[in-house]
Image (spheres, rainbow, N blue to C red):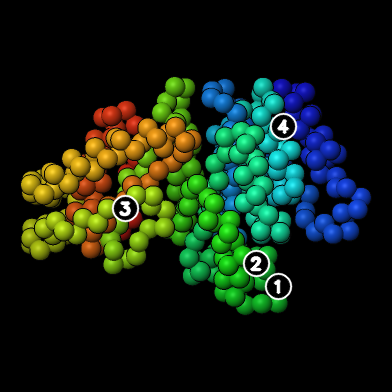
Amino acid sequence: MASVKKQVRAGRTEAIVKPKPQKAAKSKVATPKVIKQGALAVHGANELVVLTGLSGSGKLSALKAFEDLGYYAVDNLPLELIPRFAELVRGSKEIRRAALVVDIREGLLEKFPAILKQVRKLLPTTMVYLEASDEVLVRRFSETRRPHPLGRGEMMVKAIRSERRQLEPVRNVADVLLDTSKFNVHELRAHINAQFQREEGQQPLLLSVMSFGFKNGVPAEADLMFDVRFLPNPHFVPEFRKLTGRNPKVAKYVMNFPQTKEFMARVTDMLLFLLPYYVKEGKSYLTVAFGCTGGQHRSVALAEEMKKRLTHEGYRVKSAHRDMPR
């Protein structure tokens, strides 16, 4: 272990961080900061998680969550050094999992998709893109009183929107889109833990079955989405109006319709057909979303029912209800 730490640190301070003389004048990036190494994982193949996204979306908090899961955590690694870092992880017997942050501070992010493609040839890599609404980001920067990386001399909203545009090509190649607008630090940590923590021999694919209401917009993180507004709405049954799809009476009401039973049977069959192929392609996280009008009755009941069915088939499944009252 000591030799590996020494090797990585030496790479960071000498072999990795030290730029070539002819590029030194152009380099504007900060020296990458190694957060620290937690208890290292001992199962599975070596793997890498790349965290990126909007400033203020919670990347550093997410990185610390990965550190606590045993990932070797690195903040703000220059783009051109990512392939070399991946080679170090691939060749290490002690560092089985690593996580690093790449963001707007690095600059030249238009090169990132090509670099990510190169890294994926070296070892299994998952890219997580964190984002939040403009309103939430403005509030977070106001609370912390920290300037936006692009906001010196500019209005905060303008800087946020500029960063969002610049990062769009990076967002398009992400494996996981994570909107942290409604997360606090503890909820973000719990989400990371649920998605990336697993025991020896456990199914590598984590399924998130979520409900939402179309009136509040379509969830960006959904990989597969089903519109269940064709089902009778419990909202118009007085005794169900103030309840949710988690209530047994509401769930029974929704599930007793013949069209509901056939719909769920067909969707279950389709998912059981697709999921092994997602696993084969190396996908680590899949979000299946059910949407109704308000996101409180039909979609909630069906999301919970699908969670039960997929769990019974041996998959790791968690449920989330975006628009259900807390």
Is 77 positioned to the left or the right of 20 in the image?
left
Disc 4 marks which residue? 88
N-terminal of the pair, mark 4 or mark 3, is 4
Which residue occupies 71% across, 56% down?
106
Is 240 positioned to the left or the right of 30 in the image?
left
Whether residues under marks 1 and 2 lie with C-beta atoms below 8 angstroms apart, the answer is yes
Furthest-right residue in view? 21
Q: Where residue 314 sits in the image (x, y, percent)?
A: 32, 28
Residue situated in front as seen by the camera: 73 or 93:
93
Identify the element where label 4 is drawn: helix
Mark nearest the camera among 2 and 3 is 3
Identify the element where label 1 is drawn: loop
N-terminal of the pair, mark 3 or mark 1, is 1
Residue situated in front as seen by the camera: 264 or 212:
264
Disc 2 marks which residue? 148
Is 123 positioned to the left or the right of 291 in the image?
right
Mark nearest the camera among 1 and 4 is 4
Question: Which labelled disc corresponds to residue 152?
Answer: 1
Which residue occupies 42% across, 53% down?
221
Quarter assignment of residue 322: bottom left
Whether residues under marks 1 and 4 lie with C-beta atoms below 8 angstroms apart, the answer is no
Residue type at mark 4: give it: Leu
Which residue occupies 27% across, 40% down?
270
